[in-house]
Image (spheres, rainbow, N blue to C red):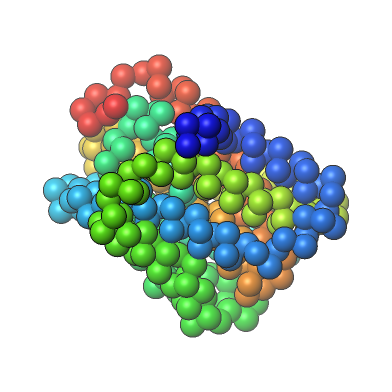
Amino acid sequence: MRTLAKAAAFAGRWFGLLILASALLGLLVPDQAARLTPWISALLGIIMFGMGLTLRLADFKVVFTRPQAVALGLVAQFTVMPVVGWALAELLQLPPLLLVGMVLVGAAPGGTASNVIVYLARGDVALSVAMTSVSTLLAPFLTPLLVLWLAGSTLPVDAGALLVSILQVVLVPVVLGIVVRALFARAVSRVLPVLPLVSVVGIMVVVFAVVGANAQTLLSTGALVVLAVILHNLIGLALGYGAGKAVRLPESSRRAASIEVGMQNSGLSAALATAHFEPLAALPAALFSVWHNISGAMLASFWARRKAGTGGR
């Protein structure tokens, strides 16, 4: 167990580079990588179950003690990111499947690595956990509606099927994880240090598979998609921070809002795109997974050297 805990710590520290390595490997052996795409949903379910194991009912108390801050993050999460994703795809004239992929990334809940990034950035971790948790629980209902609204005129969108998929691979595993931790708290506490390793490996495989399945498209038109993904992430980070500043949240809460809005659950986006559209629609999610971990790590490093104030680390 000690060896696994060390491996988990290493994976958490070098998450961004490991994801980048997975993407590069997917380009080198695309045929082998593409064979793993049918397993993406199952992998995401395992990751979300692990996320549920890290949560306790007490983590949701921030929703009641600081409802304004949580509501701000959620509104930005489910308005700024999907609309910006759609706007960028239209502006850059991306093909319909890539437009759907950008909207899916934007309409996803907060990223599973965002809490770690907020911690490293000396941000408000409790607020970050609450935002991630609540946005994940709301995703089954809001994500299909947002995709239908923004992308329904581009490609046929079965909102009901999206709802069922998110219930299966997100809500059920997360709730099950919360219940298991509540019932077997002592046993779960022993495996908590290893859970980051499960998440990192799972996301590495998802990125590896999606990049491999879209290797030819990425090599031919990748620059434009990469630009769209980078802009999407940076705009989310900036607007999340700006929204927190506009309502006078403390600095540590602004950092949490920035990272929660800018970092998306790209694994969920990739799984939904693969299951309900075509592998090409999952490409923005795979690239987002690579980039937002790199940008998040750089932002955390920048903020870690600056005092966050009340509510920080």
At which x and y percent is residue 109? Answer: 44, 57
Q: Nearer the viewer, residue 311 or 54?
A: 54
At which x and y percent is residue 183? Answer: 26, 59
Asked if one can make out residue 3 in the rendered structure from this viewpoint, the answer is yes
**Residue at 53% from the left image edge and 81% from the top image edge:** 161
In this rendering, the answer to whether 92 lies above or below 235 is below
In this rendering, the answer to whether 270 lies above or below 111 is below
Horizontal arrangement in the rendering, residue 272 relative to residue 278 (left or right): left
Quadrant the C terminus occupies: top left
**Residue at 59% from the left image edge and 51% from the top image edge:** 202
Horizontal arrangement in the rendering, residue 247 relative to residue 2 (left or right): left
At which x and y percent is residue 136? Answer: 39, 60
| Quadrant assignment, res 25 | top right
Asked if one can make out residue 219 in the rendered structure from this viewpoint, the answer is no
Horizontal arrangement in the rendering, residue 86 relative to residue 113 (left or right): right
Q: Nearer the viewer, residue 193 or 142?
A: 193
Q: Nearer the viewer, residue 81 or 60?
A: 60
Q: Nearer the viewer, residue 163 or 1?
A: 1
In this rendering, the answer to whether 132 lies above or below 169 is above
Disc tally is 0
**Residue at 68% from the left image edge and 68% from the top image edge:** 38
**Residue at 63% from the left image edge and 67% from the top image edge:** 273
| Quadrant assignment, res 122 | top left
At which x and y percent is residue 298? Answer: 53, 28
Horizontal arrangement in the rendering, residue 228 relative to residue 234 (left or right): right
